Amino acid sequence: MNISERINRLSTSATLAMAQKSAELKAAGVNVISLAVGEPDFDTPDHICKAAVKAINDGYTHYSPVAGYPELRNAISKKLLNENQLQYDPAEIVVSNGAKQSVCNALLAMVDDGDEVIIPAPYWVSYPDMVLLAGGKPVIVETGLEQNFKITPAQLKQAITAKTKALILCSPSNPTGAVYSAAELAALADVVKQHEGIAVISDEIYEHINYVGRHASIAAVPGMKPRTVIIGGVSKAYAMTGWRIGYLAAPAHFAKAVSKLQGQYTSGPGSMNQMAAVAAYSDSQECVEQMRQAFEKRKNLIMDLVRNIPGLEVNDPEGAFYVFPKCSSYYGKQADGRTIEGSADLALYLLETAHVALVGGHAFGAPDYLRMSYATSEDDIRTAMGRIKEALARLS
């Protein structure tokens, strides 16, 4: 059978590929510690699970409306108002099968063949491929450790052309943990507003895992709400990755277009999962803060350990649950007959010799870095970082 060019131009997710390799080693009896996958290790809070059971018993086992149940869109609307001071009518919200689908929906509904989408690097692995899937052209703008991995207004201005259709922002960031302040977002918004027809896709899935204060959204900058698509969901804050509930909030005409698109290829997400998400957004938020505090404690632990490894340079992440150290000082070094040519080689070396899974920065548009997830126990973090330090010390 023929494989379409649309699929041939996509790459395989490096995070999922590393997860597969580590799973194969585990199946062979190897004690692998994974710092590769962006998934909280907590169980979904009990009251949310009970809401799903109640939904099943109440008959929420049929097709939902394409854009999601009114109960959930109302709950998201209230969340956006209470937490973000942003007023969205439920008709401006579309619930999808995870925030990942919401991002892809936004791009498919917005981008025509040849349109350009600006993506600051480091970026989440799927952004460029989603742009390609939509027929667009990813325009990568490199940022670095010295600017805390955040695009500047000058860089944004230089990247804009007559073909620019959108800018993708992720704050707090996967993979760097960088968080844009309200002032930084306002400065970027000033550049965007100088150009008619450019929108911002604001991926805010990590908004609750923030160590520097209140989350800021570019949609809150005066004049930006009509040209911003907010992406959110329950996966990270409520440890609900497997429930596959995400959403986008956007002007009504755009939300209607996304609903039209979604109606043709997935329809609405799981009915009982949506009712669990209603409980997540509507009930006590104490569980969110407890998990945030646990992540912050782990962040402080792993930062101390990374800083004690010679040859790694790292910034202090302000949100999410990743550290993103620069590792290029190890390139060209050897151990056990192998030479480290880049971050992908280094990640594979650490998996095979230290039995620690992480992801090379090449997958995130930053080939001189490694992504380490600390969404795991403190004991695993200590053990993993000890193994990494020993393995790196053998390179010479």
Image (cartoon, helix red, strand yellow):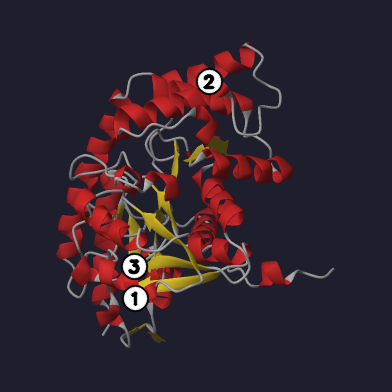
Q: Is residue 143 above or below residue 330?
A: above
Q: Amino acid at mark 1?
A: Gln
- Nearer the N terminus, badge 1 or badge 2? 2
Q: Quadrant of the C terminus?
A: bottom left
Mark 3 or mark 2, which is nearer the start of the sequence?
A: 2
Look at 43% across and 32% down and name the residue there: 88
Q: Residue furthest right?
A: 1
Gap in Å between the C-alphas at discs 2 and 3?
41 Å
Task: Give me the C-alpha separation between circle 3 and circle 1.
Answer: 28 Å
Q: Position of residue 380 (x, y in %)?
A: 31, 49
Q: Secondary structure at mark 2?
A: helix
Q: Which quadrant of the structure image shows residue 170? A: bottom left
Of residues 53 and 87, the one nearer the viewer is 87
Mark 3 burial class by Cα count in 10 Å: few <14, some 14-19, many 20+ = many
Q: Amino acid at mark 2?
A: Glu
Side (left or right) of 274 relative to 226? right
Q: Is residue 72 above or below residue 124?
A: above
Q: Secondary structure at mark 3?
A: strand
Circles 2 and 3: CB distance less than 8 Å? no
Q: Looking at the picture, does residue 172 appear above or below residue 80?
A: below
CB atoms at circles 3 and 1 under 8 Å apart? Answer: no
Q: Position of residue 85 (x, y in %)?
A: 30, 32
Judge whether residue 47 can be spotted in this image: yes
Residue 232 position by quadrant: top left
User: Where is residue 181 drawn, in percent x and y?
Assistant: 22, 51
Query: Which residue is identified by label 1?
Result: 158
Please name the residue that numbered disc 3 is placed on: 370
Label 3 or label 1, whichever comes before in sequence order:
1
> In front here: 150 or 117?
117
